[in-house]
Image (tube, rainbow, N blue to C red):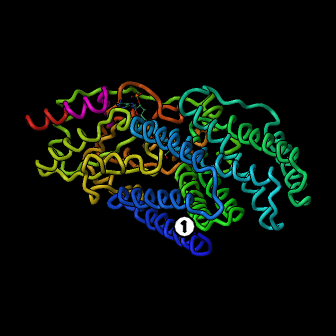
């Protein structure tokens, strides 16, 4: 194959990288997101296949088996996973990416491959970051999947993490200073220690913060892949890793901001585990309403703002909710959807569900676009949302969600809340909104209640 082969491989990597970037760009709007995933997927297929043609490549049988096993496992689990389990699925896939980057570093360092000091440093750094991301993501998966039920917090845990980090830095420096020669035992120590660091960093973090942590590990995986791209001299890895690293960083910041938390607070505070103790519940009573009465309130409104939350995803109620809105629109009611940036369990969760149900994008508004409109709404219809409409976030400094920007559903003339019972939100606290005089609780599963409302509105 010679030079031509090498050039063809590099050109294909460039094409793959371009497909990743264009795919990511398309993912920024729900209208083009699906095709964006396909574009990026094609990029990955190109990058994978072209690797077989790399001059000097061997082990084809092993590569084929690995691709077949990984591909089939991902295909089967991807098809089966419920939308509500998507965050842990992402954690798992993301962890695999970090693990792959770490494995590249481990093999290169262990084999004593000759690299210049800069590339060697990047290789070691990429290995460290990738391994932390790998073990940390697995712990995040375990927590979200309910396999690890509690957070392990103890005095001095931050000190322990700092101590492990110090050991990591020293061993990493020894490997670089020795230019990668005769450092097999140091390489083993390095990877054992950093894998442990991922575990000790993630175990104390509460389940409520896991999506932010997963996003952070996603960014780290990107960085690790980019660094290992320098080691392997692989342009596709460098570009794709950088893109993932920066996109993940932006997403992490966005999520932390939407929860009004600093990243340090997310990583070190134990949110949702300790802060609830001692918090006083809201005063007043919960007032139930039945579907026929709720249908009258909705059907004779001029403007209804729908606030979906995690419960809509659990109930898979998005199709019925849209049917309900169509019945209202047919009666001349103005209907808008208000989406909080952290409604549900992952960024864009509600947008994806509403898009799946066929809700037109021009009816869907972000929090800052619609918050001033609640005052003019006759009804705020809340479906399975809780924390994102809890007014204590504005007033109660002792609340774990204090400072989180919320949707102003309490400012609507009437509030109807569909939820199954008195279950708390993700943060584990009660919602003062539900106790307000103008709030009514329509108890039941989101999908069943939306269906009842459709019937009742059509019968008006
Ligand atoms: P939430 O606070 O988790 O509340 C969801 C509510 O849905 C529960 O109170 C539950 O009450 C109800 N529910 C559950 N199953 C239901 C069903 N089948 N039918 C009807 N209702 C049902 O939801 P949210 O308001 O969307 O808030 C999201 C939370 O997740 C926030 O605290 C946010 O910070 C956190 N979070 C989100 C992200 C993200 O990226 N989106 C990331 C990190 C953290 P019942 O049990 O009484 O039914």
Magenta region: 439-452
| Tag 1 residue | 13
Residue ID at (37%, 27%): 286
Looking at the rendered structure, the secondary structure element under dot 1 is: helix
Where residue 35 appears, as percent x and y from the top left, is 35, 59
Where residue 64 appears, as percent x and y from the top left, is 54, 47
**Residue 264 magenta-drawn?**
no
Q: Is residue 291 left or right of residue 61?
A: left
Residue ID at (33%, 40%): 382
Q: Is mark 1 within 8 Å of ligand 1?
A: no
Quadrant in which residue 144 is drawn: top right
Image quadrant where one finds the C terminus: top left
As drawn, 158 above or below 14: above
Q: Nearer the viewer, residue 115 or 433?
A: 115
Where residue 444 appears, as percent x and y from the top left, is 30, 26
**Quadrant of the rendered image holding ligand 1:** top left
User: Total label count?
Assistant: 1
- Whether residue 300 appears in this view of the structure is yes
- Whether residue 214 appears in this view of the structure is no
Residue ID at (50%, 65%): 16
Quadrant in which residue 239 is drawn: bottom right
Q: Nearer the viewer, residue 359 or 176?
A: 176
Q: Is residue 337 left or right of residue 143?
A: left
Image quadrant where one finds the N terminus: bottom right
Most extreme residue toward the front, as rendered? 1
Q: Nearer the viewer, residue 459 or 414?
A: 459
**Residue 445 magenta-drawn?**
yes
Neighbour tally class for label 1: few under 14, some 14-19, many 20 plus, Cα within 10 Å: many
Residue ID at (38%, 44%): 410
Where residue 191 appears, as percent x and y from the top left, is 78, 44
């Amino acid at each position: 194959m010679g030079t031509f082969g090498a050039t063809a491989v590099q050109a294909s990597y460039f094409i793959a990288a371009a497909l990743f970037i264009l795919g990511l760009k398309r993912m920024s709007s729900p209208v083009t997101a699906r095709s964006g995933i396909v574009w990026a997927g094609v990029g990955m297929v190109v990058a994978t296949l072209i690797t077989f043609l790399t001059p000097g490549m061997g082990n084809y049988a092993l590569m084929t088996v690995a691709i077949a096993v990984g591909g089939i496992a991902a295909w089967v689990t991807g098809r089966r996973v419920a939308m509500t389990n998507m965050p842990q699925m992402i954690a798992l896939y993301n962890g695999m990416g970090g693990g792959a980057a770490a494995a590249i570093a481990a093999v290169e360092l262990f084999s004593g491959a000759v690299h210049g000091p800069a590339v060697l440093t990047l290789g070691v750094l990429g290995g460290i970051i990738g391994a932390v991301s790998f073990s940390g993501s697995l712990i995040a998966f375990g927590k979200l999947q309910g396999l690890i039920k509690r957070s392990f917090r103890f005095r001095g845990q931050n000190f322990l993490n700092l101590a492990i980090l110090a050991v990591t830095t020293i061993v990493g420096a020894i490997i670089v200073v020795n230019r990668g020669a005769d450092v097999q035992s140091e390489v083993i120590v390095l990877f054992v220690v950093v894998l442990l660091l991922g575990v000790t960093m993630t175990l104390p973090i509460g389940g409520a913060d896991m999506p932010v942590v997963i996003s952070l590990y996603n960014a780290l995986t990107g960085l690790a892949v980019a660094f290992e791209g320098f080691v392997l001299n692989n342009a596709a890895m460098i570009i794709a890793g950088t893109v993932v690293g920066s996109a993940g960083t932006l997403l992490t910041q966005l999520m932390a901001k939407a929860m009004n938390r600093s990243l340090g607070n997310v990583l070190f505070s134990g949110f949702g585990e300790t802060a609830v103790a001692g918090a006083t519940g809201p005063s007043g009573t919960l007032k139930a309403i039945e579907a026929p009465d709720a249908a009258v309130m909705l059907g004779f409104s001029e403007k209804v703002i729908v606030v979906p939350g995690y419960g809509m995803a659990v109930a898979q109620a998005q199709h019925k909710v849209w049917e309900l809105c169509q019945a209202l629109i047919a009666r001349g009611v103005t209907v808008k959807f208000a989406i909080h940036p952290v409604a549900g369990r992952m960024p864009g969760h509600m947008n994806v569900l509403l898009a799946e149900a066929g809700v037109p994008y021009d009816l869907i508004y972000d929090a800052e676009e619609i918050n001033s409109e609640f005052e003019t709404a006759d009804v705020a219809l809340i479906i399975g949302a809780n924390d994102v409409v809890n007014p204590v976030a504005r007033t109660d400094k002792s609340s774990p969600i204090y400072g989180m920007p919320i949707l102003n559903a309490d400012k609507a003339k009437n509030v109807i809340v569909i939820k199954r019972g008195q279950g708390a939100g993700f943060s584990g606290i009660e919602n003062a909104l539900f106790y307000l005089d103008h709030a009514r609780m329509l108890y039941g599963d989101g999908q069943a209640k939306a269906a009842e409302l459709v019937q009742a509105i059509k019968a008006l």
